[in-house]
Structures are given as structure tokens and as C-alpha cells.
Image: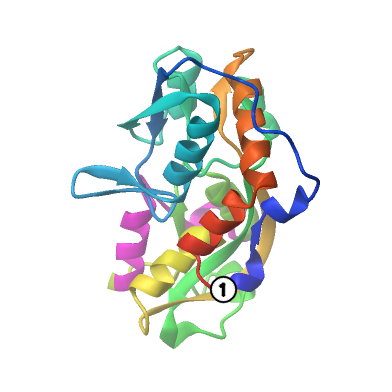
Amino acid sequence: MKNFLIGLAAATALALPAAAADLGGRVLKIGSDTTYPPHEFIEDGVVKGFDVDVVAEICARINCQPNWVSTAWDGIFAALAAGEFDMVVSGVTITEERDKIVDFSDPYIIVEQGVLMRVADAGKTIDDFKSGAMKLASQNGTTNAALGEELVGRDNLALFDAFNNAVVALQNGDVDGVIIDSTSAAAYEQEFAGQLTVGITGLSSDPLGLVFQEGDALQDAFNEGLAAIKADGTLDALVLKWWPK
């Protein structure tokens, strides 16, 4: 799995000063689809995950307090643009289309897309999906779904409101693979060891970013904080926490 999970902290090798931005303890309302482990998920009523830890560390540098709000993926960027949230953090791939209505931070991790499959189907290739012999699934409105449609066509792609529903369909035999980010695939592979595996890797390489309203000064503040946690090794440590070698 680790061969297609790439942390970005090592890319910022030069020592940088601590973040100069100070948000004065501001509470930030953060919209997130909390059904995407290990980036964000709810455990015992608390939002946890890699992205949650990243934001907490940045806020420790720039003096802010995150208030996580669980929300559906569908419409999350429009809600941010309308001012319903101060920012969105939800394993979001940076794309030109999304950048037309929101602003992104610098990337905090780069992931590849792969296909989560049943162990019994390991060894199958993307051509088995392209031919229609196997059915692919993903979450509607994601870059994963867009790539899936490009690869196998809309008729052979089942779309779900959340990735966990797609994974349940995979386990039930309703679909044969879920196209998903490497980071989340690793979590499902670990949770369902012996049942599910990442049978296809390296379909694309995607930078993930924190998301802000257009022109919001929070973007600069969070970029400062992100640079600080890259420089001092904190980001690398968080990658290892959630994806141990």
C-alpha cells in the first residue's frame, strides 16, 4: 500500500520560521463529509482522522479552534461559497473546476487512485472493468467517480452517496471494485483484512488541499501553518500515525 501513498512534508526540506499568522483564537466552522476514513470519520460522537489532526496542528501554530460540522458531500463546495462554512476539509482533491468557485491551500498530501476489490478477484485488471465483465463503483461527485467514468464508461459505474456504501456493495457482491484514493483504500484494506485488497494501483496522482471561500485571508494563514508543520516534521509524523510502515 505504501508504494502509492506519498507524504509531502519531505518536499519542504528547508527550515522555515514558525507561522507568523495569528487568528486570535478564532473558532472556525469546518464542513466535512465525515464518512471518509481515515481522513475524517466519527467515533464515539467525535470527528477524528488524519485531516482532523492536520488542522489541529495548524491551528496550534496560527491560534484558531476548529469546530467540525458533519455534512453531506453533495453541495459541500456550494455551501462553502455561500458562507455556510469558514472552510471545508474532507480529503478534497485540488482541481481547476473546483478552483473556479473556491480557493485551495497548498497541497498537504498527494494520493494515488486505485481500485479496492475482493481478495478473490486480486489479479484482475482495469481492462476487466472496461470490458464490462466487472462492475466498478465510487462516490458521486468525486474525482474518483470522474476518473471511473472516463475509464469504464457511465453504464459500468455504480455511484453511491458515500464511499462506505460503495464498500458495502462490494462486500455484498453487487459491484466488483471501488475506485478510491489510496489513503482511504489502505484503511478499508486494513479493516477488512483477508476480505478486501487494493488490486489495481496508480490510476492517477492527486494533490489534496484545504478549501476556503474565494479571496479569504484564511488561505494565507493556513498556508503559513502548513509550511510550519511540514518544516518541523509534524506532517510526516501524522502520515506515519495514520499509515504506519
Q: Quadrant of residue 231?
A: top right
Depth check: give the residue in front, 34 or 143: 34
Q: Give 60 or 68, whichever is nearer the viewer.
A: 60
Q: Is residue 139 visible?
A: yes
| Residue drawn 52% across the image and 55% down it | 238
182 vs 163, nearest the viewer? 182
Residue 166 lies in magenta, yes or no? yes
Which corner quadrant holds the N terminus? bottom right
Closest to the observer: 175 or 229? Answer: 229
Other-residue count near label 1 (Cα within 10 Å), few / some / many at <14 / 14–19 / ≥20: some
Quarter location, residue 38: bottom left
User: Residue 195, position in %: x, y?
Assistant: 35, 81
For this orientation, the residue located farthest to the left is: 44
Give the magenta-colored segment's residue range: 152-171
**Residue at the spot x=56%, y=70% of the render?**
129
**Rendered view: 68 above or below 184:** above
Q: Position of residue 218 (x, y in %)?
A: 57, 19
Query: Mark 1: which secondary structure?
Result: loop
Q: Could you say where residue 19 lies in the image, as x and y percent from the top left?
A: 64, 29
> Which residue is disc 1 drawn over?
1
Instruction: Please state if 130 lies on the left or on the right of 157 as rendered.
Output: right
Please state, as top left, top right, bottom left or bottom right, where the C terminus lies in the image: bottom right
Q: Main secondary structure of the magenta part?
A: helix
The kind of residue tagged 1 is Met
Q: Is residue 62 above or below residue 209?
A: above
- The residue drawn where x is 56% and y is 82% is 124
Q: Is residue 152 above or below residue 234?
A: below
Q: Residue at x 42, y 42 (%)?
A: 52
